Image (cartoon, helix red, strand yellow):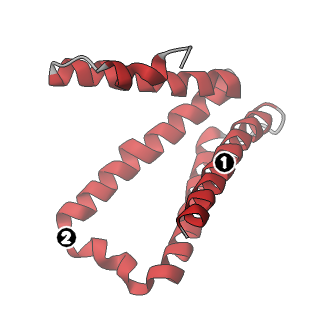
Amino acid sequence: MQTNHHMRGIIYASLAAILWGMTGITSQYLFQAGGVNVAWMMGVKMFLASITLLIIAYSREKNAIFDIFHSIKDVFSLVVFSLFGMAGVQFTYSMTVHHSNATIATILQTLGVVLVIFYSAVIFKQWPKRKNGLPLSPHW
């Protein structure tokens, strides 16, 4: 049972990475050849993704998906995450693809991990341990 669950996770993660990579290339094509507006595409993409996820969540959890609206703190957290987390990342990634290309946008987004590590080191006044810096190493 555990092996099947583990394999399903690997498949989902691989599929997500493939689809994410395809969106960068597709976005670049639409911006350059199709003249698509970044804000419009981002809005449509986020809307369709949210509707899809809500349908999947509702099919599994039914009305429990609305429990988040019982707490104003949870609603506030959701709104902040939606605006500054998801929309912020999507918008900056899409704008980078629009003004350069999908490769540069992906590299810059990947470098965000380095910024998070340095930010955390400054805020928590503790440099990361060697094992935490492993993703930054070119020879792991």
Query: Is label 2 or label 1 in front?
Result: 1
**Labels 2 & 1 near each other (Cβ < 8 A):** no
Q: Disc 1 designates what residue?
A: 14
List x then y, in percent, for residue 98: 67, 29
What's the amino acid at mark 1? Ser
Q: CA distance from mark 2 to mark 1?
A: 35 Å
Count how many numbered circles sit on residues in the image.
2
Looking at the picture, does residue 36 appear above or below residue 136?
below
Residue displayed at 55% across by 14% down: 138
Locate residue 117 relative to residue 6 in the image: left or right. Answer: left
Locate residue 66 relative to residue 102 in the image: left or right. Answer: left
Locate residue 69 relative to residue 18 in the image: left or right. Answer: left
As helix, strand or loop, the secondary structure at mark 1 comes to helix
Few, some or many C-alpha atoms within 10 Å of disc 2 (few <14, some 14-19, many ≥20)? Answer: few
List x then y, in percent, for residue 73: 18, 61
Based on the displayed image, in which of its 4 quarters is residue 24 positioned?
top right
